[in-house]
Image: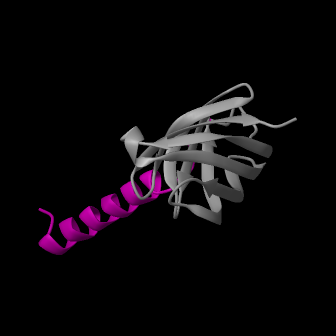
Amino acid sequence: MMTRKRWLLIGAAVLMIAGCASGSGAPSTPPSVNLTGKWSGSWQFTPVSAGSGQVTMDLTQTGSDVNGSVLVTGPAVNQPTTVQGTVSGNEFRLGGRISGTFVVTGDQMSGNVNGMLPATATLTRQK
């Protein structure tokens, strides 16, 4: 018969193994797109009556990690900042100060961004 202490040790070991297996944060699918380059386009708040504007990003991708600068302009914003994210397949997930998800198709990405208000954005790679 197992002692209570042994059951606690087994339970702790199982939790540690489960935490290691699910806590990597790595994308589940290798990137199928490379976002390195300059992107520009437009955004609009949801609701649209709250405003809209332009957005430009200069991104660098290494493996699945993406970093870069972004400039958002519009009626209530005009702030340069930085962005970080990851790519899994053709999905670009922003994290940090600006969060959101974009789907990348060729030289275009479209998606939703969470900021002051929810917004949608569509950007095109500049050549």
Seen from the viewer's position, the closer of residues 73 and 14 is 73
Image quadrant containing the N terminus: bottom left
Magenta residues: mostly which secondary structure?
helix
- Taking the view exactly as shown, the residue that stands out farthest to the bottom is 5
Question: From the viewer's perspective, is residue 48 above or below residue 75?
Answer: above
Residue range in magenta is 1-29
Residue displayed at 53% across by 55% down? 75
- Taking the view exactly as shown, the residue that stands out farthest to the top is 106
How many marks can you see?
0
Residue 9 on image: x %, y %: 27, 70
- Taking the view exactly as shown, the residue that stands out farthest to the right is 127
Residue 60 on image: x %, y %: 78, 52
The answer to whether any part of residue 45 appears in the image is: yes
The answer to whether any part of residue 28 appears in the image is: no
Question: From the viewer's perspective, is residue 52 above or below residue 79?
Answer: above
Question: From the viewer's perspective, is residue 14 above or below residue 33?
Answer: below
Q: Is residue 9 magenta?
A: yes
Seen from the viewer's position, the closer of residues 84 and 117 is 117
Residue displayed at 18% across by 74% down? 5
